[in-house]
Every structure is written in C-alpha cells, then in structure tokens.
Image (tube, rainbow, N blue to C red):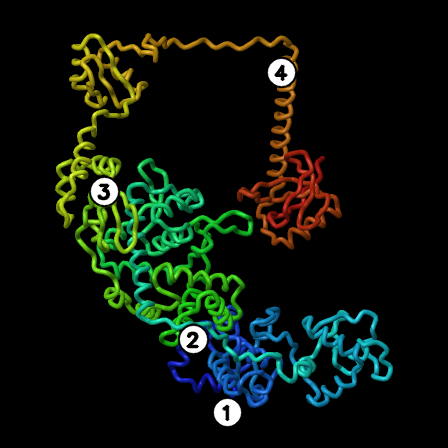
C-alpha cells in the first residue's frame, strides 16, 4: 500500500496522463485549486460527479468504501479486517478508490472523501451496510463485546431488531441518562451501556462500533468479493458463428424488405410520433416474425437513420425510408449488418417495452419518442461483455444462463435501478435476434464490434454468396437456391408472392402477382423475358399461359376519377368547347361523341364555361335540369313580444352599467394623473410591502404602479385593506370594486391626498 500522504501531495505526485484521465472523468476538479487540502477535497466532491463515480463501482468497491465511511478514519490494515472479503481483493479495491479520489490518505490514515457518506445514505443493499459511523470516542472492540454479553435476552433481541431496521429507533418513555444498576427496561439497558446513543428529538441510533460487533467485526455478514458465476454449457465456436451469421443475414434481408414496402405504402405516424398497433401487426405479417421482433427491426432501422417521418402523398406525416437507405442498400450485406448492429448497440431506445403498459396503463407504441432510457446502451454493452469474458467453447446455458448474466451485471453495477435487470435480459434476446449472438454465445465478429473494430470482414466470410438465378417449377413456383441478389429479389417480389422462406425461398406466381407487375408498367413481353432470363430451368407452359391470360384481360375495363361531366346532343358544341384556346386549363377530355369529362370542380367549371360564351345548365342525378334558385329563409315570429321588451330593458341596463364603469375609470385616471409624482422611485418587493402596510394602518389612499401578467404597467388609486401572503387586498377606484394585487408586481407606492 502507498505511504500515508495528504490528498494535495497525492495530486502533485500523479503523472500528467493519470491526472488528465481524472480530470476527464471529474471535470469539476479543473477549477483553480486552493492551497488547503481540506478545501480541495470539498470542491472535488460535487454531487453530480460523485454520483457518477459511485455508479461505476462494483459491489466489492462499494463495500470497501462503505467500510471507510463506517470506520471514519482507519489504516489499510484495519480496513482489511472490516470487509468480509479476501485481503488482496480489498487492497485492490482500495487502490481503485484512491485512484478515483473517492478516498484519500492522510497522516492519520485512510478516509472516504467528504460527501460520500451523504451520497451513499438511503440506498440499502448493493454495497451499503446500513451502519452508522463509529463514534469519535468508540471503546475497543473487546469492550463492546463485553457489554453485549451483559445484556438480558430481551435487550439483545431489541438491539438486533434496531440493527435490522436501519440503526435508528425511538425510546418512548425510557430514560436516556441512567446507570446500569438503575436500568429498568431493555431500552434503558442499552442506553446505560452506550449501545444506543440518544440524539435530538427522542431518537436513538446504533453506533457503528456496536453494529460491527453484532456482525462479527465486519460490515456485512456475507462475503462481498464472490462474483456471481455465469451458468454455461459447452458449444463449438464455429456453430455459434454460423448460427449468429444466419440470423444476421435474415435481419438485413427483413429490414430491406420492410423499407422497400414502406417506400411505396408508408404507415401513418401517430400524433404522438409513434407507429400504430395495426401497422406493427401488418409489419410482423409482412416479415413473417412475431410483433416483438418486428418492433425490434423497426426501432433498429430508426436508430440507424434509415427511417424517419415525412409527408406522404396526401400531406399527412408518415414513416418513410430516408435518403441513407439508398446508399445503405447498395453496400455488401456484411457492411449493412454492421451499420444496424452498431446503431442498436449505441441507441437509447427500448424496443423490448413495445406492447407493455406505462405507469398510466397505456400501451407503449413502437417509435414512440418517450420509449428510451439513458442506461439502455450501457446495459447492452455490459451484457455482451459478460458473454465475451466466457472461456472459449462455452456459451450461456439455456434457461438458467440469462438470469446468471443478470446477476453478474448487478454485481458489477449494484447502484443501477431495478429496471436494469429487465434491460439486461432484453439485451440478450435482442442480440440473438439481430445476429450478435448464436446458441447463447457471442459471435466472433460481434467481439470486434464490441471493441470498436469493423465486424464486416469477419462476417463476410460467414454469409452465403448471393445467387443470380431461380429454378422454375411446373406448379407456378420459383425456388431460389440461396440468397438472391438485391436487385433480383426486388424484381421477383414484384411479379411473384413469397410462399416460404428459409435456406431456399419459394416464390409463387398468381394472377394477382402478375397483375401487380402489369400495374407497375411491365408488359407481357417483358415478363416473359424476365422469367426466362433468371431461370436455370425451362419456363413451364402453365406460367406462360398465366402471363398471357392475365395480360389479355388486363385493362378491359378502365376506372378513373373526374370532377364533372359535360353532356350535349350537339356534338359540334362540345367540339368547339374542347378546342377553345381558353379551355386548355379545364382538363376536358372526350369519352364519347356527346360526353366530355373534366378534372375541374363543378363550382369552378360552370362560371368558366359561361365566360367562354356558353350557356350550360347543371344536370341533376336523375337527368333533369337542376333548379339553382335559392330558397328564401324566414324565421317564426315570436308569440310574446314582452320577452323582446324585457331583453331590450336588460340590454339598456348593461349599456348603462358599462357607461358608468367607463366614467369611473376615466375619473380615476384623471385623479391618478394629478397625483403622479415627478419622479417615481422603483421599489423592491420589501419596500412596497412596508409602504402598503403603512397605508393599511393609516387608512390612506395610495397611487400604485402595477405590472399585470401581460407585462403592461398601469397606475391605479387604491384604498389598501390588508396585506397578507404577498397579496394586497384593496378597493380599486378604477373598477370601483375590491381586488387583490401581487405585491411583487407593484413597482411604486405614492400617498394620495384625500379627495375634497
């Protein structure tokens, strides 16, 4: 262990590299350092940096720091005896605490940094013993044990109960200052022997030296250096890599399929910014996965920047692929997977919560902005690091393995909230679905990703080579003997439906799929050429007949949208309108010798046609001429005219009251202008309060300058009635009623002479 030195001496002796790393972790230490070491330690222990440092400690390191708090100030040798752990492990933990400046050495021994005790108070378990610090005049451990042996069974039981409940209790009617011989109750026995120490307010506390004696001389009853073991099983590394690579390839393919679909048919974004439940179910059906996996893929694409909200064709917000998707889809599959995996590893999003209920009972939607946590990225990385530390040839056992990983992470970061366990468990499931893990083990290329290297070269050798052909079958199906090239897969998905996926994808040609290709602009000749060029087997005759039959009936009936039609028995009149030079913008098109249709709405088309010199009329749905004369509206005459008279009287009274209020306000303003001082000093809230209280006592009128909620300043003559709770209650001459004014909004107070 290093020698006993002050904190200031330790900082001076540190190397530049070590001090730079400390200042990076603790930016508050970069302030000018005072000469006194106690002041330097006080300034270094700001709460925010202290909490961050404590959150990064393991259970052993927290227990060692807690023992320093309980001991108050001790030597490294005594500290080793206070912690129930191996001496070497305790010494190593103390070295790290000294390196982080959470503990420091002085000539009298080692002690915790100021503020550590407060930061660790109230957090039971996970590194805190719950013991109070030792008393300044604590007796030797042998004397404490002797006093414990003298207790009656009832007093011993009471003392252990207080220790288990946090070390504080109330004594009720028991006397605090009593000798051992005069003690009449178990509580007085404990107080007489200083096993409980009274504090103000009738509270007694259990000193740290007594708590240590009850626990056998250590701060905890169990060993704190035993790292939870991860339950493992044997598995070949090659099997892990191949299984993970297969999942990685499926992730890339499904994300590409998803974004291709949303390029033409994007789902509407909710007002909250999320994805609707129905759209998520449709996505799961499209990708042939369950809804949690669909939510994971959608959230991963969003985290990678491949998905965002934009206006659809109708101007409504929708989820559509970004421009980055075009460049991403042109990359190799391994590089595309690396972008997705890196985004998932660093994102704060929580896909595992999709479908669950929030504290208000409302279900979480995918892509909802609030679905995030600042601890999510750390939980994923720590879970994968636990897998990376497993010996070669071993993986996490199914069933009992994931809970053991959660326990290991909880030991490494015991101060994290309870939700950390759920995040770690979800990280293992998501890593397997995304292809970072396979069969419970971390893939080789995922280790490179975890260390900040490019995993694409390692993954590329594990992915299957894409194929550029299919095998056509006589039952109108096409079998892809491997992963198809991206361009071929997109075209084939347009002309055929995916029937099954796996090592070999099966596509089925149907009248609907052929019609879909014709709708997108393909011709029958192009379809024949495409299926013939991509097939390694002859094109079967049923497929040729299917394409020809569908193309022959395609377009026999046409459907379109129009806003209005023009019908006339005089074909020449319609011809003249159709070719009129000023009718080009009306969107007229002849569909029959006596019928024209237009894309212009009827209320716009009708006056435009009349401007062209025509005399068109509107035709009703039954073919008759529509009468455009407006109906004349009338109201029923009231039976009781006295009601009207009463209403007139009320209206007159309202007008009179309004006029009276206006006159009162004008007179009040004139009086305020006459009594306005030449220079009005702005008062502080306390000055205004004193002036107003004086006006209340003298019952004098005052002129106040008042700033309302809109920032408008007005002058009012008021008669103060009372000033309580920062509010002035006064009679306002302007409104001629009693009002309340906020004192902090009154900027000036001036006495007003009584009116003659």
Could you tell me which residue is drawn at 51 percent across and 73 percent down?
411
Q: Is residue 503 left or right of residue 661?
A: left
Disc 4 target residue: 648
Disc 3 target residue: 475
Vertical position of residue 195 compared to residue 364: above or below: below
Could you tell me which residue is drawn at 83 percent across and 70 percent down?
173
Q: Is residue 43 left or right of residue 586?
A: right
* Residue 565 shows in the view: yes
Whether pointer 1 and pointer 4 mark residues with C-beta atoms closer than 8 Å, the reply is no
- Which x, y percent locates residue 328? 25, 55
Please, what secondary structure does the residue beneath circle 3 have?
loop
- Tell which residue pokes out farthest to the bottom in this image: 3
Disc 1 target residue: 3
Disc 2 target residue: 23
Whether pointer 4 and pointer 2 mark residues with C-beta atoms closer than 8 Å, the reply is no
Label 1 vs 2, first from the N-terminus: 1
Label 1 vs 4, first from the N-terminus: 1
Label 4 or label 3, whichever lies nearer to me, is 3
């Amino acid at each position: 262990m290093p020698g006993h030195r002050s904190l200031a001496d330790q900082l001076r002796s540190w190397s530049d590299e070590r001090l730079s790393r400390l200042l990076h972790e603790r930016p508050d230490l970069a302030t000018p350092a005072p000469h006194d070491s106690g002041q330097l330690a006080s300034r270094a222990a700001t709460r925010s940096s202290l909490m961050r440092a404590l959150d990064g400690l393991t259970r052993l390191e927290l227990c060692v720091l807690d023992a320093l708090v309980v001991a108050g100030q001790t030597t490294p040798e005594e500290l080793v005896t206070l912690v129930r752990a191996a001496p070497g492990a305790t010494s190593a933990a103390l070295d790290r605490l000294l390196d982080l400046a959470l503990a420091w050495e002085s000539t009298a021994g080692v002690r915790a940094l100021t503020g550590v005790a407060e930061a660790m108070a109230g957090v039971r378990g996970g590194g805190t013993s719950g013991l109070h610090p030792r008393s300044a005049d604590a007796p030797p451990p042998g004397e404490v044990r002797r006093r414990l042996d003298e207790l009656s069974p009832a007093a011993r039981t009471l003392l252990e109960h207080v220790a288990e409940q946090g070390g504080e209790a109330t004594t009720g009617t028991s006397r605090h200052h009593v000798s051992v011989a005069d003690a009449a109750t178990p509580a007085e026995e404990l107080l007489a022997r200083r096993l409980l120490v009274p504090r103000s307010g009738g509270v007694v506390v259990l000193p740290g030296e007594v708590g240590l004696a009850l626990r056998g001389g250590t701060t905890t009853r169990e060993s704190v250096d035993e790292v939870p073991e991860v339950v493992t099983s044997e598995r070949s590394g090659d099997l892990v890599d191949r299984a993970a690579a297969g999942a990685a390839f499926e992730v890339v393919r499904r994300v590409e399929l998803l974004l291709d679909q949303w390029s033409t048919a994007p789902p509407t974004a909710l007002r909250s910014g999320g994805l609707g439940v129905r759209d998520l179910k449709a996505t799961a059906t499209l990708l042939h996965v369950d809804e949690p996996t669909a939510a994971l893929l959608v959230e991963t694409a969003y985290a990678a920047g491949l998905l965002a909200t934009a206006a659809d064709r109708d101007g409504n917000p929708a989820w559509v692929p970004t421009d980055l998707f075009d460049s991403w889809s042109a990359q190799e599959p391994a590089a595309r997977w690396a972008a997705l995996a890196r985004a998932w590893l660093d994102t704060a999003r929580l896909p595992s919560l999709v479908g669950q209920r929030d504290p208000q009972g409302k279900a979480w939607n995918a892509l909802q902005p609030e679905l995030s946590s600042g601890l999510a990225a750390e939980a994923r990385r720590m879970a994968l690091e636990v897998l990376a530390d497993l010996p070669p040839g071993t993986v996490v056992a199914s069933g009992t393995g994931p809970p053991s990983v959660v326990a290991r992470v909880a030991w490494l970061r015991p101060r994290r909230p309870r939700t950390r366990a759920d995040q770690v468990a979800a990280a293992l499931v998501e890593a397997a679905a995304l292809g970072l893990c396979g069969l419970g083990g971390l893939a080789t290329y995922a280790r490179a990703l975890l260390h900040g290297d490019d995993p694409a070269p390692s993954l590329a050798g594990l992915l299957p080579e894409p194929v550029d052909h299919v095998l056509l079958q006589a039952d109108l199906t096409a079998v892809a003997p491997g992963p198809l090239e991206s361009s071929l897969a997109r075209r084939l998905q347009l002309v055929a439906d995916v029937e099954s996926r796996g090592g070999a994808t099966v596509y089925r040609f149907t009248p609907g799929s052929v019609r879909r290709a014709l709708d997108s602009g393909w011709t029958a000749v192009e379809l024949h050429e495409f299926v013939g060029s991509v097939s390694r087997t002859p094109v079967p005759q049923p497929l040729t007949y299917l394409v020809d039959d569908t193309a022959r009936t395609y377009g026999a009936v046409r459907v379109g949208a129009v806003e209005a039609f023009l019908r006339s028995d005089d074909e020449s009149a319609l011809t003249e309108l159709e070719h009129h030079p000023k009718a080009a913008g009306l969107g007229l098109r002849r569909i029959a010798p006596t019928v024209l249709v237009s894309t212009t709405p009827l209320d716009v088309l009708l006056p435009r046609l009349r401007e062209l010199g025509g005399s068109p009329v509107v035709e009703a749905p039954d073919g008759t001429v529509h009468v455009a004369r407006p109906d004349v509206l009338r109201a029923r005459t009231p039976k009781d005219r006295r009601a009207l008279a009463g209403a007139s009287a009320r209206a007159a009274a309202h007008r009179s009251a309004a006029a009276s209020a206006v006159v009162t306000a004008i007179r009040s303003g004139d009086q305020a202008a006459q009594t306005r001082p030449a220079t009005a000093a702005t008062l502080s809230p306390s000055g205004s309060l004193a002036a107003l209280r004086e006006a209340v006592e003298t019952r004098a009128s005052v002129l106040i300058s008042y700033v309302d909620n809109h920032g408008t300043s007005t002058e009012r003559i008021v008669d103060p009635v009372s000033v309580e709770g920062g509010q002035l209650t006064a009679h306002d001459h302007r409104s001629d009623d009693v009002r309340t004014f906020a004192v902090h909004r009154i900027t000036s107070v001036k006495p007003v002479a009584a009116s003659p």
